Structure formats: structure tokens, C-alpha cells
Image (cartoon, rainbow, N blue to C red):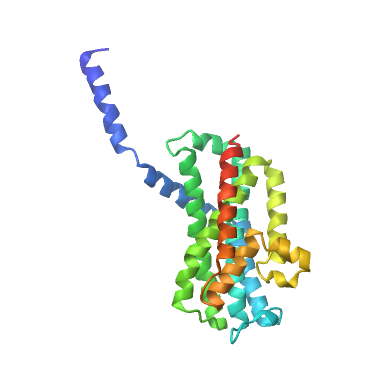
């Protein structure tokens, strides 16, 4: 190799590194890709938007929630908090959990984890994608709820944002844990069953008081029940008691700690 060739190769390396995207830009690009993948998938769109909207309308036009109205709260006032929690669970489980399970099966995770994005960047991109989709879900639910009579205070709307982020952290950790430890087919089955169970009897749409005594006590410690309780308190009472926040925080920490310890990339 000549001296000029050697010098050109040495100077080319720094210039190529200088032109490489920074880690935050890589994470944002991955988040954009993950977001568009979820939104463009017809099956996921059904779970992310269509079913929550249908559930909101059904709970508003029927008397299922009449026994849980507080003060002058309307049916839609009681329904919206639970629907927002359902949106988070749909995004974390069906939107990312199942997709991650099949990405792992086909070797996509192993490939992406060796790129400059890295494992931490990949997980961060997935979490940001869930938050982006949640913002879309919030806007759609609000657009449907307002004509139905939903009139929340701005304080409640602003207060619900950090609550929903905490809920997203907890359920994304659970979704990633299941996707990273079970086979793709098992992940699909488990997450769908859990989604249905939590929506029906997990304290999401209805308070746990509707359940028998011992079951009510047990379900109250689930992240779904804590999330539903926290959002209902935020919108209907204007403040949130510390117990559901502590339950959500504990689930978030434990689920992510377990994911870091046991997640399998292949």
C-alpha cells in the first residue's frame, strides 16, 4: 500500500464516523419505524383504535357504568379513563409485545442488536413508539368522547399524561418480558389471553368492587387495576392516591428488571 493510499484510508475513517447518525437520531428513526409498523398493520389497528372506540361508545350508550358514577359525572366521564388504560395495554401487548416476539423468532432482534443502534437503543425505540401511538390513541379517544359529552378539566388532562407514561412503562416491561422469554406462538397466545382477561376483569373498565371479596383484593394489586383506579381518580376526583401509583411503579421496576435479566435475543 502506498503512503498516499494509507493516508486517505486513515482520513476517511474519521469523516465516515463524523457523518454517522448520533444515537438519539438512531433511536428516533427506530421509533418512527416501529410506530408506522403498528399503525399500518390492519390487525393491530383493530386492537389499537377500533376496539377501544367501540368499547367507549358501548359503555356510554348503555347503563353498565351507572353504578360507578361519582357526583355529576356522566357515563362517558367514567368510561374514558378505563378506555385510555385499555389503549396502553393494547399498544404494549399487541402492538409491541407480539411484534417483538416474532422479530426475535426470525432473527431481527439479533441483527438489530449488533448494529450501532444497540440493544438499549432498540428497546428505547420501541418504548418511544408505544408513547407515540398512545398520543394518537389519546387524540382519537378524545375526538370521539367530546361529542358524547366528555368535558374534562385541563388539570386532569395534563395530570393524566405522566400517569399514562407510568402505565406504559409497566405494561411495556411486561410485554417485553413475555416476548423475550417465550416462543413467538406462545407470546401471541399469552398476550391475547391476558389482554382479554385484564379488559374483562382486571379493573380496567370496571372498578374491582364488582368482583367477589377475595378476588377483588387480589386484582387490586395488578397493574391494570392500579392504572384504572389512578386514571379514574385523576379525571373524576382531581387527585390520585399514592397506593395505585406505588403499585404501578413497583410493576414497572420489577418487570424491567426481569426483562433485563431474562430477555433472550435469539
State the image coordinates of residue 97 (x, y, percent, origin top left): 61, 50
Q: Position of residue 119 (x, y in %)?
A: 49, 39
Number of marks in picture: 0
Q: Is residue 16 above or below residue 100?
A: above
Q: Quadrant of the N terminus?
A: top left
Please state which of residues 129 and 219 is positioned toward the viewer in this rendering.
219
Image side of residue 17 versus residue 150, left or right: left
| Residue 242, x across and y down, in percent | 55, 65
> In x, y percent, where is residue 176?
59, 47
Quadrant occupied by the C terminus: top right
Say if residue 40 shows up in the picture: no
Q: Residue furthest top?
A: 1
Q: Quadrant of residue 86?
A: bottom right
Q: Is 142 above or below relative to 70?
A: above
Residue furthest to the front in view is 242
Residue drawn at x 55%, y 62% is 245
Residue drawn at (60%, 59%) of the image: 247
Amino acid at each position: 500500500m502506498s503512503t498516499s493510499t494509507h493516508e486517505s484510508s486513515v482520513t476517511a475513517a474519521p469523516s465516515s464516523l463524523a457523518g454517522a447518525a448520533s444515537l438519539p437520531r438512531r433511536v428516533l428513526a427506530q421509533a418512527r419505524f416501529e410506530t408506522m409498523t403498528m399503525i399500518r398493520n390492519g390487525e393491530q389497528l383493530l386492537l389499537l383504535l377500533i376496539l377501544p372506540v367501540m368499547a367507549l361508545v358501548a359503555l356510554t350508550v348503555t347503563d353498565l357504568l351507572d353504578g360507578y358514577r361519582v357526583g355529576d359525572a356522566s357515563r362517558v366521564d367514567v368510561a374514558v379513563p378505563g378506555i385510555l388504560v385499555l389503549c396502553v395495554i393494547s399498544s404494549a401487548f399487541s402492538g409491541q409485545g407480539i411484534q417483538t416476539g416474532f422479530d426475535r423468532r426470525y432473527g431481527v432482534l439479533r441483527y438489530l442488536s449488533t448494529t450501532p443502534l444497540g440493544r438499549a437503543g432498540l428497546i428505547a425505540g420501541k418504548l418511544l413508539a408505544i408513547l407515540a401511538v398512545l398520543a394518537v390513541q389519546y387524540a382519537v379517544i378524545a375526538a370521539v368522547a367530546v361529542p358524547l359529552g366528555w368535558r374534562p378539566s385541563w388539570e386532569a388532562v395534563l395530570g393524566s399524561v405522566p400517569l399514562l407514561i407510568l402505565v406504559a412503562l409497566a405494561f411495556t416491561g411486561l410485554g417485553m418480558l413475555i416476548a423475550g422469554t417465550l416462543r413467538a406462538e406462545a407470546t401471541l397466545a399469552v398476550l391475547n389471553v391476558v389482554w382479554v382477561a385484564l379488559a374483562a376483569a382486571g379493573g380496567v373498565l370496571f372498578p374491582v368492587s364488582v368482583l367477589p371479596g377475595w378476588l377483588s383484593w387480589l386484582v387490586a394489586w395488578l397493574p391494570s387495576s392500579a392504572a384504572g383506579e389512578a386514571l379514574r381518580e385523576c379525571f373524576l376526583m382531581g387527585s390520585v392516591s399514592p397506593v395505585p401509583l406505588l403499585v404501578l411503579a413497583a410493576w414497572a421496576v420489577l418487570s424491567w428488571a426481569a426483562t433485563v435479566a431474562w430477555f433472550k435475543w435469539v
